[in-house]
Image (cartoon, rainbow, N blue to C red):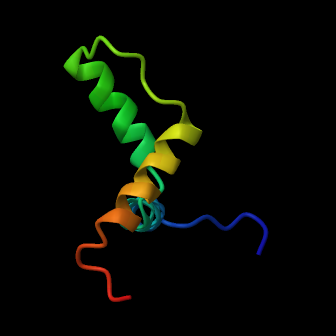
Amino acid sequence: MAGTTAPPGLLDGLRGLVRFFRDVMGEDAYRKYRAHHAATGCAAAPMSEREFWKDRFDRQDANPGGRCC
């Protein structure tokens, strides 16, 4: 199948699907945190990625909310 290419719309759809699942799983949460931190002009230094994930999981453990278990 040398020389075959996928239609451009198909590739865009697959990229969108990957982006959707990453968003649902929270994979881009740190990137969103940094963007929000920069946009709001917070005077405090942003958390490192390690600190961010530790804080996020600690908050989820303390406040399980809608989790099933």
Which quarter of the rendered picture does the C terminus lie within? bottom left
Q: Nearer the viewer, residue 33 or 64?
A: 64
So how many labels did they put on this image?
0
Q: Nearer the viewer, residue 9 or 3?
A: 9
**Where is residue 11 shown, x and y percent of the image?**
48, 62
**What residue do we see at 58% from left, 41% from top?**
50
**Where is residue 38 shown, x and y percent of the image?**
31, 20
Relative to 34, is 64 above or below?
Answer: below
Relative to 9, is 40 above or below?
Answer: above
Relative to 32, is 23 above or below?
Answer: below
Residue lying farthest to the top in this orientation: 43
**What residue do we see at 53% from left, 39% from top?**
51
Which quarter of the rendered picture does the N terminus lie within? bottom right
**What residue do we see at 55% from left, 67% from top?**
6
**What residue do we see at 73% from left, 63% from top?**
3
Within the image, what quadrant is residue 63 found in? bottom left
Q: Nearer the viewer, residue 49 or 17?
A: 49
**Where is residue 47 shown, x and y percent of the image?**
47, 29
Q: Nearer the viewer, residue 35 or 8?
A: 35
User: In the picture provided, is 64 more to the left or to the right than 54?
Assistant: left
